[in-house]
Image (cartoon, rainbow, N blue to C red):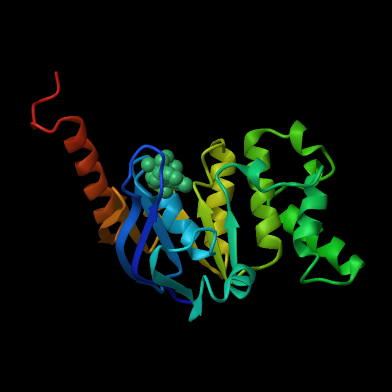
Amino acid sequence: MPAVAFDQVRVAVETEDSPQPKVLLDAVSLRLDEARVGVIGANGSGKSTLLRLVNGLIQPTSGTVTVDGDDTVRAVRKVRRNVGFVFTDPLSQLVMPTGREDVELSLRRSVRNGTERRSKAESALARLGLLHLADQSIYELSGGERQLMALAAVLAVEPKVLVLDEPSTLLDLRNRELLRRTLADLDQQIIMSTHDLDLALDMDRVLVVQEGQVAFDGAPTEAVAAYRHWCMQALDPAGRDAP
Ligand SMILES: Nc1ncnc2c1ncn2[C@@H]1O[C@H](COP(=O)(O)OP(=O)(O)OP(=O)(O)O)[C@@H](O)[C@H]1O
């Protein structure tokens, strides 16, 4: 299992609102060896920022991120070959007119032979029950169908690490269960952010991100309990009883 390591990572960006850079993530040091790592936390806490560092979509302002020893800045091409990234919004990922073309496109670099490529694409689509939608325009698919299509395109290339940013937001109950089973069957390491706490409970380790820092890191049940506690505290800081 490749290790993903963060060493004293800080991400800060310039904004027009303030002369000071805005800190999106700070003091993150982690070594992720587990097969299934969940990332939970409030909206805007820094989950996507943390995930995007893993495949070099965002570079640390200071500190380093490595995947299997490869630095995500200096060895970004190698890192991108090893790390598949599934975006929350599938339309930011699907670029071809149909799902089949998109899955075949993602295989272009790794599978030179056209017949083999078509067959691999077919298997990736079949695995997620998408063959009947493979030749339909991406724009005629539902949000959930597109979300699964984007996952099929990334899984087709069999990355060593699969990073998923809130992959179940658009899925109905059946497809959420399909996603859950598909992820459970995969050999690769999975790092996934989610607001779906049941999905988080399937993980081996869960990070709770709060205001740009990892506020809890440990077993899923304890992480979810800590997150719930902080949410309640934020809603009712004085600890008053609900009306
Ligand atoms: N390029 C940027 N410039 C300025 N602020 C940014 C930039 N990118 C992200 N942010 C801010 O950083 C914070 C963390 O964003 P991030 O997308 O990582 O949150 P998140 O935990 O994934 O949220 P959500 O659950 O809503 O998807 C947010 O306040 C966001 O507005």
Return the x and y of residue 168 as percentages of the image width and height: 52, 43
Q: Residue at image x 61%, y 67%?
A: 80
Relative vertical location of residue 144 with respect to residue 61 in this rendering, above or below:
above
Q: Quarter holding the C terminus?
A: top left
Q: How many labels does the image show?
A: 0
Q: Which residue lies furthest to the right in this view?
A: 115
Return the x and y of residue 73 as percentages of the image width and height: 52, 71
For ligand 1, give the image quadrant: top left
Give the side of residue 36 with respect to residue 172, left or right: left
Q: Residue at image x 59%, y 48%?
A: 178
Q: Residue furthest front?
A: 19
Relative vertical location of residue 42 with respect to residue 12 in this rendering, above or below:
above
Return the x and y of residue 157 as percentages of the image width and height: 70, 66
Relative vertical location of residue 110 with respect to residue 179 in this rendering, above or below:
below
Q: Residue furthest bottom?
A: 69
Give the side of residue 193 with respect to residue 205, left or right: right
Return the x and y of residue 204 as percentages of the image width and height: 38, 64
The answer to whether any part of residue 196 appears in the image is no
**Toward the viewer: 186 or 103?**
103
The answer to whether any part of residue 161 appears in the image is yes
Q: Residue at image x 17%, y 37%?
A: 233
Give the side of residue 153 with respect to residue 166, left or right: right
**Toward the viewer: 167 or 198?**
167
Give the side of residue 195 with respect to residue 75, left or right: left
Instruction: Tell me which corner region of the image, top left, top right, bottom left or bottom right, holds residue 9.
Output: bottom left
